[in-house]
Image: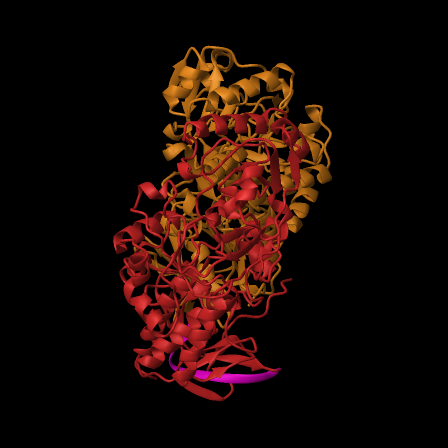
Chain colours: A red, B orange
């Protein structure tokens, strides 16, 4: 029998009288919920924002604080880059694919400049300077970074421009983004009910009309006259849902605030809502981008399998889904020393040797395997070429003794991730509810569930199978705003 | 907007009076539906069997006719093999994993001898002779075959025994299995309503109490006093569901009777039923097992990635999910000539060359890539070893000029598959409804949906991510029987 909390709805005729009534009820106070509440309120709707934790922030506040924006933002321009919505769209379609949501990506890219202004005018800070090397979170406060746009195969599909807009912050910037959004929520006089867990929908006929929640063990009933917006996050913290829908994530570290239990998704499924691409995930592999780009990423038999200059989230997906995380970073002393200690996050090589043959033996790879790979890599690198995976020649040079190997599965602890990267990666889910472009939750026949909206990681969002940093905060706030606007526009009941 | 047929239920107070009433209503006349109907009837329940096509058979009748059975069946014994339920269980847990359904696999293996008897006593024919080489469907009528049990890593996890029980037949045996089951259905006087498409459930309170169907454009209403059993198959024929849940299958050939539209799955989801592992799939890669086992299977940069003697379905999954189907079979003239023409299914090499260097260039692989792989393979094969992937030494010998390459994506047409293997593979889905061990459909909170059962490919069955031939017919009939028994035991309403 399942250990899941019951997720089925309550009929409005059997629900308690409402403790609170509002136009739009937003569940979950991460970036998507905050954006939805702000937009609904700005359009004149009465809004209440529920949050299960003791305060706002959610998993958004634990994030690096990158926001994927482009099309020629002031920050891009100040750094000397031109960009178009079309190039941004072409990159995201490819990098988030296959089977990314083309319509939502088009809207997101066409609306990106306006969305930059929306964030910026609320006080989200971005510094107009570029960090120019692969990284999870740069050690500086530079406000712009590449997120794989200049790596093959993508560099050939769309004109590259850096689109990672980093919220100015010491270290991780998610907490700064959420602080700014929280100030805006306060200024808009939106009531926030913390420590409040939405457990069941109230159904009025076939329409979602509120929720039954619990606060410190007591039942609290909310009615929404116009709509309920789920911004409850993904299901990475729910081991049972992970085993059912994204089994390859089992046992890995989780990037979240601990509350991504998928309950909001299940509440909607209990009404017949559809889901999409539930097995997709961001894979924060525990490697240092600055190190791997200067060396080789190889599998258990010493084979390279990807160009090491791709956005590290795509390295992580390839490592997990295609190599079962049995991967090693191979580098030489020079590569290791080129990366300043503060950027190594405490990672030290697990094996070191004077020759590749010795390293191969120490790591336990078949005789001749890694040796052959390094020989091939060096031979082509000497000519400035990578005919296997087309790594940019900026990063190509023959590796020289002594050599070292880092076992990715041994993990590391990122400075502020709040997660140990268990088993070599820290993950979160990308699959979730099927939604239309205005956040309307769709049932399994593709018809909107009346009264119900969703945004952020509770939805399948813009993603196919790929993931690029900055898109979660980016599309969470962008489609959160659209959901807020759509719910506010519903005639009140 | 979606093109999906509406899948939501009808309230019993609004449904037409029943045209037909029965105890147990079975929807779908493939192997799972037939087994469910037979078992329910044998326990005294009145049964009606609905089928959308003009006659029974479903996708089961299009299959090769292998049934995965073990634990020491008379056929295994006659061929000189001992086997235990425990070894069978250990193999399936590993080969169908990770995250296979351990409880169902245990039941399936413990019940395998009894299930063999059930099939055999109804007249399903098996010949006591072994086909001893990797194959999709052997060219002989041998009744027993290996399905990867003797290949690494599985051979080290469980004592190998061949468990592929082939229904005696000229060519594909699925049609013979379904002919035998249909004779049993006729003998049991179970009414079969063909050309009847179940479109919506009838809900009585929260209980599934029947279906509204259409037959030649007319609405026909069925009431079930004890239970409704979905045996409607998977969703491989529904492009929209495939894009949402198993996007990597998009554009490939489909192994089915054309009716695996997932509508039964969606009807249950509309009631809040849960699904599991919707991205899993069988991948019938278009290669000839007898050829690849004698050569090498390599990716786009000439790397081997799996031992070629594994069950070919696992080769297919690795090729699709880990190498995007950009794979080639590399072999030499001797290997090609060792495989009789009738077993080659018309496959001829797309490239041939006197040296590996020339072949590498013709195929378009990086200079030195395939050459290095063949050199490594030959060097180790000469010593009777495969330290990379542990292919059995029976199949290891250095490859000698002239060489040839087969491009798997160019596909082929299997003699009786009814599918062209578009894009290099023909697939069907393994994900589906969450069910308990007696076929009870579970909602997203893990609670049975009253009155609703399911079996076969409409369910997630026993599978994690792997697939082994014979398990679909095997677990379809096995858990079909259990669902039939469970529904028959419900007190009539």
Q: Report x, y in % for residue A37.
A: 39, 77
Q: Tell me, yes or no, whether the highlighted magenta stretch contains residue B270.
A: no
Of A398 and A61, nearer the camera is A398
Of helix, strand and loop, which mostly describes the magenta segment? strand
In the displayed structure image, the side of residue A340 where residue A391 appears, left or right: left
Of B326 and A409, nearer the camera is A409
Decide: is A310 above or below A180. above
Residue A128, quarter of picture: bottom left
In the displayed structure image, the side of residue B483 where residue B156 appears, left or right: right
Q: Report x, y in % for residue A231.
A: 45, 70
Residue A97 shows in this picture: no
Q: Tell me, yes or no, whether the highlighted magenta stretch contains residue A226.
A: yes
Image quarter in which the N terminus of chain A is found: bottom right
Residue A11 shows in this picture: yes
Q: Which residues are magenta?
A: A217-229
Decide: is A360 above or below B241. above
Q: Report x, y in % for residue A260.
A: 54, 65
Residue drawn at point x = 36 percent, y = 66 percent = A479
């Amino acid at each position: 029998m399942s250990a899941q909390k019951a997720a089925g709805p309550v009929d409005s005729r059997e629900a308690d009288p409402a403790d609170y009534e509002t136009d739009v009820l937003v569940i979950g106070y991460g970036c998507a919920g905050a954006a939805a509440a702000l937009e609904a309120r700005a359009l004149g709707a009465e809004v209440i924002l529920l949050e299960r934790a003791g305060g706002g922030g959610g998993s958004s506040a634990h994030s690096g604080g990158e926001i994927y924006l482009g099309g020629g933002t002031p920050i891009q321009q100040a750094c000397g880059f031109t960009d178009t919505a079309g190039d941004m769209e072409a990159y995201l379609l490819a990098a988030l694919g296959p089977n990314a949501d083309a319509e939502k990506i088009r809207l997101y890219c066409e609306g990106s400049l306006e969305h930059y202004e929306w964030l910026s005018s609320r006080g989200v800070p971005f510094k107009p300077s570029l960090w120019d090397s692969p990284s999870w979170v740069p050690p500086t406060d530079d406000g712009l970074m590449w997120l794989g746009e200049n790596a093959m195969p993508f560099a050939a599909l769309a004109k590259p421009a850096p689109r990672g807009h980093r919220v100015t912050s010491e270290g991780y910037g998610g907490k700064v983004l959420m602080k700014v959004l929280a100030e805006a929520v306060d200024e808009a006089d939106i009531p926030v009910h913390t420590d409040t867990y939405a457990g069941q929908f109230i159904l009025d006929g076939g329409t979602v009309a509120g929720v039954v929640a619990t606060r410190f063990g007591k039942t609290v009933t909310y009615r929404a006259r116009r709509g309920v917006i789920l911004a409850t996050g993904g299901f990475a913290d729910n081991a049972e849902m992970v085993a059912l829908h994204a089994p390859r994530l089992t046992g890995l570290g989780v990037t979240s605030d601990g509350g991504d239990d998928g309950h909001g998704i299940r509440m909607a499924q209990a009404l017949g809502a559809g889901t999409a691409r539930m097995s997709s995930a961001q894979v924060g592999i525990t490697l240092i981008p600055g190190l791997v780009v200067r060396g080789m990423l190889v599998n258990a038999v010493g084979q390279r399998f990807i160009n090491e200059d791709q956005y590290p989230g795509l390295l992580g997906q390839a490592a997990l889904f295609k190599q079962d995380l049995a991967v090693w970073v191979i580098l030489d002393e020079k590569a290791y020393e080129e990366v300043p200690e503060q950027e190594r996050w405490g990672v030290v090589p697990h094996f070191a040797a004077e020759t590749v043959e010795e390293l191969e033996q120490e790591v336990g790879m078949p005789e001749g395997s890694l040796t052959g790979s390094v020989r091939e890599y060096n031979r082509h690198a000497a000519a400035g070429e990578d005919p296997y995976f087309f790594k940019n020649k900026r990063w190509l040079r023959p590796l020289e003794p002594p050599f070292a190997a880092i076992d990715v599965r041994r993990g590391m602890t990122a400075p502020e991730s709040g997660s140990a990267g268990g088993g070599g990666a820290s993950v979160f889910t990308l699959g979730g509810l099927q939604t239309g472009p205005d956040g309307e939750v769709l049932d399994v026949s593709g018809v909107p569930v009346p009264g119900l909206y969703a945004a952020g990681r509770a939805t399948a969002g813009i993603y196919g199978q790929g993931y690029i940093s900055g898109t979660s905060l980016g599309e969470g706030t962008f489609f959160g705003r659209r959901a807020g606007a759509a719910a506010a526009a519903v005639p009140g009941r």
